[in-house]
Image (spheres, helix red, strand yellow):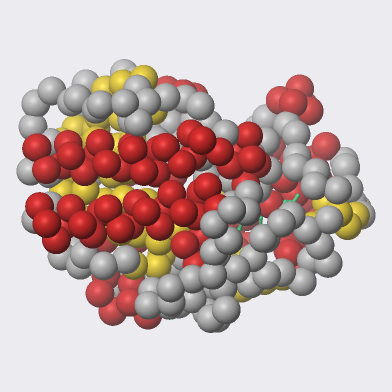
Amino acid sequence: MKRILITGAAGFLGSHLCDRYIKEGFHVIAMDNLITGDIKNIEHLFKLKQFEFYNHDVTKFVHVPGKLDYILHFASPASPIDYLKIPIQTLKVGSLGTHNLLGLAKEKNARILIASTSEVYGDPLVHPQTEDYYGNVNTIGPRGVYDEAKRFQESITMAYHTYHGVETRIVRIFNTYGPRMRLNDGRVVPAFIGQALRGEDLTIFGDGMQTRSFCYVDDQVEGIYKLLLSDYVFPVNIGNPDEITIKEFAEEIVKLTGTDQKVIYKALPIDDPLQRQPDITKAKEILNWEPKTGRSQGMKLTLEYFKSFSSKELQKSEHRDFS
Ligand code: UDP
């Protein structure tokens, strides 16, 4: 049985990856320090003997007994509200944490895939973003702690590949949504759905003309799965190129939830990228991958998940306010 370590396992993407690798017959060693992850996301796996969980902070030395075939490094805060609250941890998990996991991969002779992000492109001056675009990042802005940690993460990963011969893979993840997103993580999908379900106005930041391209979680997981199995060591964009303005997206949510909520406008957060769309030519060519789930289908599934929350849980959610 192949053994895989997944860091950030109790998070949104990490927990879906745990499910996928269990389904594929792997022994899954899940690790998370639960700062932004939620144990509920993986609770259903605890009864399985091919699943184990370590509550551990990967910025400290990481030890895993026995052999390891693969490592997926997905531990990191991943929403702007989190970078503002825990900037130092964000920097540490992308840098020190990645260093520890690369060291573990070298020691165990394991293949490691690290989760990078479209944020390495910053507020992009090239559109859509291709992997050979170097990016436009403000190092000292509020997002700098995440963006620069992820850029460092890519550098150290390539260095371990080049100098130590470690088998590495780098995925650049574009906005991904689906069940198990944290209701209060401030990201636009749970923010708008939460507001609509609570009967509040939807808060659009800026004029709403900024764009994003949303990928359903199952498509993202499939792309990551294929990348890990491929022999391609350079970064690969995984995301859905279907681009939409935030204003149009708010209108879609109002329609989808069948509410008659208004939209209200708030200040645009500092360094909020004005446009974002992945160029997925590489993923198509190298991995034979492209997203299959349209936004209307994916959003329906996501809404169903959030509808299962009690009204008390819905009330607990907070949202970002930069005004
Ligand atoms: N956004 C918004 N209202 C919200 C939350 C987010 O208008 O309540 C905007 C945000 O300013 C950004 C976009 O939606 O332009 C996506 O934000 P998110 O935090 O989901 O992801 P990221 O900015 O990292 O792509």
Position of 308 with respect to 57 (left or right) is right
Q: Residue at x 63, y 49 (%)?
A: 142
Is residue 225 visible from the viewing direction of this image? no
- Quadrant of the rendering where the N terminus is positioned: top left
> Residue 94 or 55: which is nearer the viewer?
94
Position of 307 with respect to 129 (left or right) is right
Position of 145 with respect to 93 (left or right) is right
Q: Is residue 154 above or below residue 22?
A: below
Position of 68 with respect to 278 (left or right) is left
Is residue 123 visible from the viewing direction of this image? yes
Q: Residue at x 78, y 28 (%)?
A: 315
Q: Quadrant of ligand 1?
A: bottom right
* Residue 133, quarter of the rendered image: bottom left
Furthest residue toward front: 140
* Residue 290, quarter of the rendered image: bottom left
Q: Is residue 288 above or below residue 179?
A: below
Q: Is residue 93 above or below residue 192?
A: above
Place of residue 74 in the rendered image (x, y in percent of width and height, measured from the top left): 38, 43
* Residue 238, quarter of the rendered image: bottom left
Place of residue 16 in the rendered image (x, y in percent of width and height, measured from the top left): 40, 42
Place of residue 223 in the rendered image (x, y in percent of width and height, measured from the top left): 34, 61
Q: Residue at x 33, y 57 (%)?
A: 154
Q: Residue at x 56, y 73 (%)?
A: 124
Place of residue 251 in the rendered image (x, y in percent of width and height, measured from the top left): 80, 63
